[in-house]
């Protein structure tokens, strides 16, 4: 009777062990699933972090560019204001130049020793000096380049001629003075520019003439 009762108990134990193994397998599978899900969550977090960092970097770059553009705009505005201040008198100064030209031409034409001529010359000279004083106050400078190399930025060549003793491409005469306002050209000087003397034609007879 004891032998008959042992077999069922062994079967029960086997079934219990199988159940334990199945339970362990299920538990391991659940752990594996949870681990996989956990790893997936970490990858998603890493990806989200990388995207956030990239977005933050993009926003920082935009902020830096915007700051640089604001600084450039500020500098341009400041420069424009300075230029407007420096060159506000451009149109007015250009209108004054013909008046000074007329005074200087009149002074050159006033010849003679009569009292009237002397008074006219003195008055003209005084007026020209007053103009020069005003021009100096507002940084208007004269371009009178006799003897200087020709500068196309400040000079306008009216004539080119060979002048004995003058270096080629130098100014030998000024028809009309030029002027600068704060270094910017108001009017170019109209000048005569020296050129190289032309070589005389050769007096050596040609071969045909010798023949």
Image (spheres, helix red, strand yellow):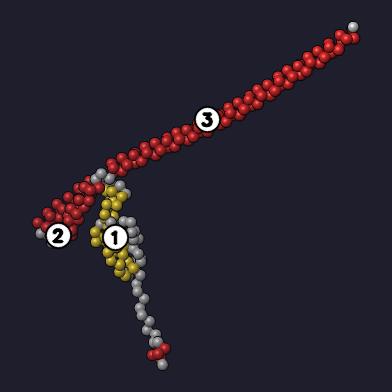
In the rendering, which numbered label is found on residue 110? 2
Mark 2 is surrounded, within 10 Å at the Cα level, by few (under 14), some (14 to 19) or many (20 or more) other residues, namely some
| For the residues bearing labels 3 and 1, Cβ distance under 8 angstroms | no
The structure residue drawn at horizontal position 24% and vertical position 61%, both measured from the top left corner, is 175
Mark-to-mark CA distance, 3 and 1: 64 Å
Q: Is residue 154 above or below residue 208?
A: above
Mark-to-mark CA distance, 3 and 2: 86 Å
Would you name the residue on which mark 3 appears?
52
The structure residue drawn at horizontal position 16% and vertical position 58%, both measured from the top left corner, is 106
Q: Which quadrant is home to the N terminus? A: top right
| For the residues bearing labels 3 and 2, Cβ distance under 8 angstroms | no
Give the mark toward the camera: 1 or 2.
1
97 or 85, nearer to the observer = 85
Q: How many marks?
A: 3
Furthest residue in direction bottom, as rendered: 211
Give the mark toward the camera: 3 or 1.
3
Which of pointers 3 and 1 lies earlier in the amino acid sequence?
3
The secondary structure type at the circle numbered 3 is helix
79 or 38, nearer to the observer = 38
In the rendering, which numbered label is found on residue 156? 1
Percent from the top left, x then y, of residue 140? Answer: 27, 48
The structure residue drawn at horizontal position 63% and vertical position 24%, both measured from the top left corner, is 38
Tell me the quarter of the picture where residue 151 sits.
bottom left
Tell me the quarter of the picture where residue 164 sits.
bottom left
172 or 159, nearer to the observer = 159
Which of pointers 1 and 2 lies earlier in the amino acid sequence?
2
175 or 127, nearer to the observer = 175
Percent from the top left, x then y, of residue 114? Answer: 10, 59
Mark 3 is surrounded, within 10 Å at the Cα level, by few (under 14), some (14 to 19) or many (20 or more) other residues, namely few
Tell me the quarter of the picture where residue 160 sits.
bottom left
């Amino acid at each position: 009777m004891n032998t008959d009762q042992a077999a069922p108990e062994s079967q029960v134990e086997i079934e219990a062990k199988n159940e334990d193994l199945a339970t362990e397998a299920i538990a391991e599978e659940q752990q594996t699933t949870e681990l996989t899900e956990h790893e997936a969550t970490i990858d998603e977090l890493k990806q989200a972090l990388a995207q956030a960092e990239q977005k933050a970097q993009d926003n920082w770059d935009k902020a830096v560019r915007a700051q640089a553009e604001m600084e450039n705009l500020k500098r341009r505005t400041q420069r424009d204001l300075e230029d407007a201040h420096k060159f506000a008198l451009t149109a007015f100064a250009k209108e004054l130049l013909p008046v000074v030209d007329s005074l200087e031409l009149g002074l050159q034409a006033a010849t003679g020793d009569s009292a009237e001529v002397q008074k006219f010359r003195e008055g003209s000279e005084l007026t020209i000096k007053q103009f020069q004083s005003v021009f100096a106050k507002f940084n208007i400078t004269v371009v009178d380049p006799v003897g200087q190399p020709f500068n196309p930025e400040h000079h306008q060549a009216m004539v080119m001629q060979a002048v004995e003793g003058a270096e080629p491409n130098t100014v030998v005469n000024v028809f009309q003075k030029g002027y600068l306002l704060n270094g910017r050209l108001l009017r170019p000087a109209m000048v005569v520019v020296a050129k190289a003397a032309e070589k005389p034609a050769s007096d050596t007879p040609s071969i045909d003439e010798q023949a």
